[in-house]
Image (tube, rainbow, N blue to C red):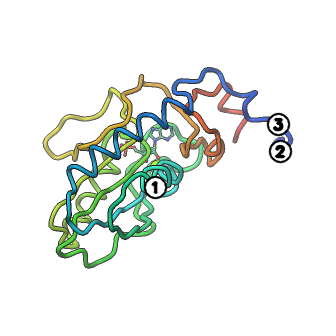
């Protein structure tokens, strides 16, 4: 019999270390929004929010962007279940087929191998986007620098090479609701 999940536990008690507090995230998003608004200018904007990880980030970011925009959710998964290493990109919910004339801003939670972003950028281009920009809240140091890998124009924070959760990022779909970015201990109890 698999062990029963403990649903009563307070998630804050499982945190090993807070890497980025909520206030620091908010301050950085203020600055990112200004950068993005400056780069986009008056162009018609479509946001492609990579679910589920960018859920909280995109909600905070778009409310600081005083631009006319459409918002689409896309779902690309590279870390199924309890794995903490990338397993390749699976498309569950694609971008719209026709993005001609649009400036597309892809928003994701974290840039690690770059595969997720590369797949999203390729889809936006295939849909005829006029310009494709991308923004991630976090970037890990192992990010691949190969020519074939898309790089984000806007990055919130560079972080160390640890598996992090919170502010939308999950481990096995848990911890997304933490208001800060943190490392958790005993990942194996969350299965
Ligand atoms: P990439 O395709 O390797 O760049 O990985 C990006 C995706 O992997 C993100 O959209 C996240 O969902 C997931 N990911 C990468 N690192 C972490 C992490 O430390 N915590 C939680 N999810 C992560
Ligand atoms: Mg994700």
> On the rendered structure, is 16 left or right of 31?
right
Are the two marked residues, 1 and 2, in contact with CB atoms closer than 8 angstroms? no
Q: Residue at x 27, y 43 (%)?
A: 35
Circle 3 residue: 9
Q: Residue at x 84, y 41 (%)?
A: 6
Q: Which residue is mark 2?
A: 7
* Closer to the eye: label 1 or 3: 1
Within-10-Å neighbours for mark 3: few <14, some 14–19, many 20+ = few
Q: Residue at x 33, y 75 (%)?
A: 96
Percent of width and height locating residue 134 = 28, 50
Q: Which residue is mark 1?
A: 63
- Distance CA(mark 1)–CA(mark 3): 32 Å
Q: Nearer the viewer, residue 115 or 58?
A: 58
Q: Are marks 2 and 3 in contact (CB under 8 Å)?
A: yes
Of badges 1 and 2, the one in the foreground is 1
Above or below for 20 versus 78: above
């Amino acid at each position: 019999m698999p062990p029963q999940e403990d649903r009563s536990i307070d998630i804050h008690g499982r945190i090993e270390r807070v890497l980025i507090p909520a206030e620091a995230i908010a301050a950085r998003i203020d600055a990112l929004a200004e950068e993005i608004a400056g780069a986009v200018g008056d162009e018609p904007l479509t946001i492609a929010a990579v679910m589920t990880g960018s859920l909280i980030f995109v909600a905070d970011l778009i409310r600081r962007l005083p631009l006319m925009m459409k918002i689409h959710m896309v779902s690309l998964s590279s870390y199924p279940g309890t794995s903490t290493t990338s397993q390749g990109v699976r498309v569950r919910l694609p971008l719209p087929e026709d993005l001609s004339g649009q400036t597309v801003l892809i928003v994701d939670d974290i840039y690690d191998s770059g595969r997720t972003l590369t797949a999203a950028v390729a889809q936006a281009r295939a849909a005829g986007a006029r310009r494709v920009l991308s923004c991630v809240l976090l970037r890990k140091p192992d990010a691949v620098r190969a020519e074939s890998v898309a790089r984000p124009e806007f990055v919130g924070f560079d972080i160390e090479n640890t598996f992090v959760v919170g502010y939308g990022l999950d481990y096995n779909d848990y911890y997304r609701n933490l208001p800060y970015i943190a490392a958790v201990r005993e990942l194996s109890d969350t299965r």
